[in-house]
Amino acid sequence: MVAVCDPNKEAKGYRDWELNYLKDEIRKTIKKPDWNPGGDNTIPGGRDNGKDIVDTYYANVRNDQKFKGCAAYADPRRLLDKEKDLDAVKIMTPDHLHGVLCMAAIRRGKHVLVHKPISNRLIEGKRVIEMARNNPKLITHLIPWDSNGSMDTVMNWINAGAIGTLKEVHNWTNRPVWPQYPELPADKPPVPEGFDWDLWLGPESDRPYHPNYTNMVFRGWYDFGGGSMADMGHYSLWTVFKALQLTSPTVIEPHRSHFCDFNGAVPFRVNNDFSFPMASTVRFGISGQWWPGPH
């Protein structure tokens, strides 16, 4: 690993499922039990942490490699221009940057590993797939966890007629397990020192910085994430898709929850076109059949 890239320099303002889990895992991996991320809390993040983790790992775990040090960049375009001998790129950004970074790497002849989803815009995802197919010498790999247990026993029951004709598949998830905001931020806190907000926005439209757009809550916004479906849909439905050999749905029918507020003494329904609902059901239809996706 020769370079890391992040528009955020230091571990400031990060959020995670637990306060110490990631830090403790890093300590074990790099064999440095007193490692700390610095910044303003115990949650690691930013390119300074990334560079330090890589350098410490090679020094403590793989010191036979004659490692020359990890470079750190804020701008992925600069990384791709400067690191001429780079073989592959691993993309672990918020969803809205997946597609454009995949395309930038493929255009430069780099192998690509990307976390789900392939993009946050359908047209970008189609373009990424088209570019990958047109560059057969490049390896492109979707890297999320893709096993939810064996379906062999279930498929044996289905194929033996134990439940009759399979007509529907029902799937549930407890997502979202992060806040999703029904209204746009009203306040305008300052951009943290060392954080390039414009680079983080990437291809999305300009707006004032707010911490409720970033880190683990990005996926609740249309512009930056794909909601619960992009988070959990692959994990919980891939096994079903694979076992039943399903193809793309022809009809998708969503039903969403809504949010209410008061205007003085009178309640009203808050409608928005910028964030995902608190809860929803989504029905996928294929060849006249329905099989609901994540609830």
Image (cartoon, helix red, strand yellow):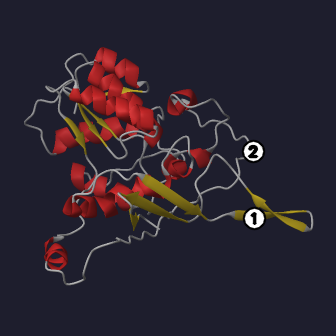
Q: Is residue 257 left or right of residue 34?
A: right
Q: Is residue 111 left or right of residue 274?
A: left
The residue under the point 67% across, 63% down is 258
Foreground disc of the pair 2, 1: 1
Of the numbered discs 2 and 1, the one sitting upstream in the chain is: 2
Question: Farthest residue toward the front?
Answer: 288
Task: Give amino acid for label 2.
Answer: Asp
Q: Which residue is mark 2?
A: 187
Label 2 element class: loop
Any part of residue 94 in sight:
no
Identity of the residue drawn at 44% across and 54% down: 251
Q: From the top left corner, tell me how far across and down residue 204 is, in percent.
A: 55, 31
Q: Report the residue at 40% width, 39% height from top.
A: 119
Q: Residue at x 33, y 64 (%)?
A: 236
Classify 10 Å Cα crowding around label 2: few (below 14), some (14-19), many (20 and above).
few
Distance between the Cα atoms at labels 2 and 1? 21 Å
Query: Residue 212 appears at what percent x and percent y?
Result: 61, 49
SS for dot 1: strand
The percent coordinates of residue 170 (x first, y second) are 38, 72
- Establish if 23 lies above or below 114: below
Q: Which residue is mark 1?
A: 260
Image quadrant holding the N terminus, namely top left
Q: Position of residue 75 (x, y in %)?
A: 43, 24
The residue under label 1 is which amino acid type?
A: Cys
Left/right of residue 3 with respect to residue 173 in the rendered view = left
Image-quadrant location for residue 137: top left
Q: Residue furthest left?
A: 64
Above or below: residue 60 compared with residue 138: below
> 238 or 92: which is nearer to us?
238
Query: Can residue 34 be seen from the camera position used here?
Result: yes
